[in-house]
Amino acid sequence: DPFDENVGTKVFNPYFAYLITHPKGNVLFDTAGHPALATDPHSRMGATADSFRVKMEPSDWVVPRLMEIGLKPSDISVVVQSHLHFDHTGALGWFTHADVLVQEKELQFALKPPVYQAGAYIQADFDMGLKWRKLDGEADVFGDGKIRCIPTPGHTPGHQSLWVDLPSRPLFLLADAHYLLAKLRQRLMPGFLWSPDAMLSTWDHIEEIERKTGARLVVTHELDYETSVPRSPGGYYS
C-alpha cells in the first residue's frame, strides 16, 4: 500500500501453498517458492533478489512439507496455479505428472511479461513440459462443485482464486487478489499490480461470493500468519 503510514518499511510475509484432499485426488493450490531461494536466491531471481531478503529453511518448501504428512509429489493429481509469479510456482518442476490448471491469459502474460512485472516471473519455474489445462473463466475442478477456480484479475490479468466447499464452512483461497485482507476491506491498492480497475471489480466480486456462501477469506501473504493460519503438519481447515 503506497499510502500506508509505514510505507517503505520492510516486513516478512509468508509464501504459502495449500493442499486440498478430495475423493477424486489431491490438489495443490500454488507451489510456493523454489528450494534454491533458501541458499542462492540470485540463481533463480537474478537482480530481483536484491529487493528481497529470503528467510527460509531447507525444509520450507512444498516437497518436504508434503512428506511431513505422508505424501509424495506423485500423490498430487492436480495443481491449480493462482498465477505464475515466482513465489507461487517454484516447485512446479516436481509435478510434471499432474494436471496444472491456469488461466490462459495468465500463461500468455507470463511468457511475455511487460517490463513492470518481468522481475516477478521466472520462466524456468513454469516453461517446461507441464500438463497444462488452460482455462478461460470459471472451472469446476472435479465436476462436483466442491473445488472451483474463479478468475480474480487485477494483480495479474490471469489471476484466479480457489473456492473450496469444506464441511464446516466454505473456504475462499484468494492468493494475491490482495496481500492483506484488511486492505481489501478498505479498498487500498497494493503497490504491485496489473490493473487497479480490474482489482476493484475483483474485490466486489469476492465480497459478493462471501455474502452468498459465507466463505472464509484467506490471502496468501497475511502478515499475522503465525497466529491466524493453521499450518501443516498439525493444522488444517476442515
Image: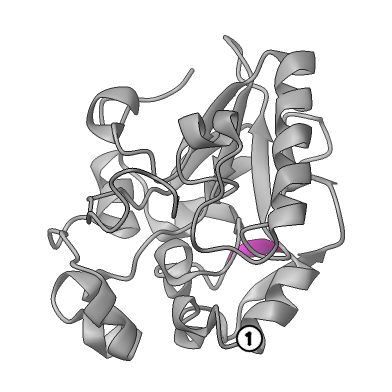
- Give how far across and how far down residue 23 sits, in percent: 63, 32
Residue identified by numbered label 1: 114
What amino acid does circle 1 point to?
Answer: Pro
Identify the residue at horizontal 77%, vertical 41% (top origin): 142
- Give how far across and how far down residue 89 sits, in percent: 47, 67
What secondary structure is found at the residue carrying circle 1?
loop
Please say if 171 is above or below 21. above
Residue sitting farthest toward the top: 168
Please say if 47 is above or below 205. below
Q: Nearer the viewer, residue 89 or 128?
A: 89
Please say if 51 is above or below 28. below
Task: Determine whether, in the image, residue 56 is placed left or right of residue 69.
Answer: left
Say whether residue 49 is magenta: no
Identify the residue at horizontal 32%, vertical 53% (top origin): 7
Q: Nearer the viewer, residue 188 or 122?
A: 188
Q: Nearer the viewer, residue 191 or 107?
A: 191
Identify the residue at horizontal 67%, vertical 58% (top origin): 159
Please say if 113 is above or below 134. below
The reply to whether residue 141 is in sight is: no
Q: Which residues are magenta?
A: 98-102
Residue 112 appears in which quarter of the rendering?
bottom right
Identify the residue at horizontal 63%, vertical 79% (top origin): 110
Residue 9 appears in which quarter of the rendering?
bottom left
Q: Residues within 10 Å of mark 1 (few under 14, many from 20)?
A: few
The reply to whether residue 88 is in sight is: yes
- Give how far across and how far down residue 120 sits, in percent: 47, 75
Q: Main secondary structure of the magenta part?
A: strand
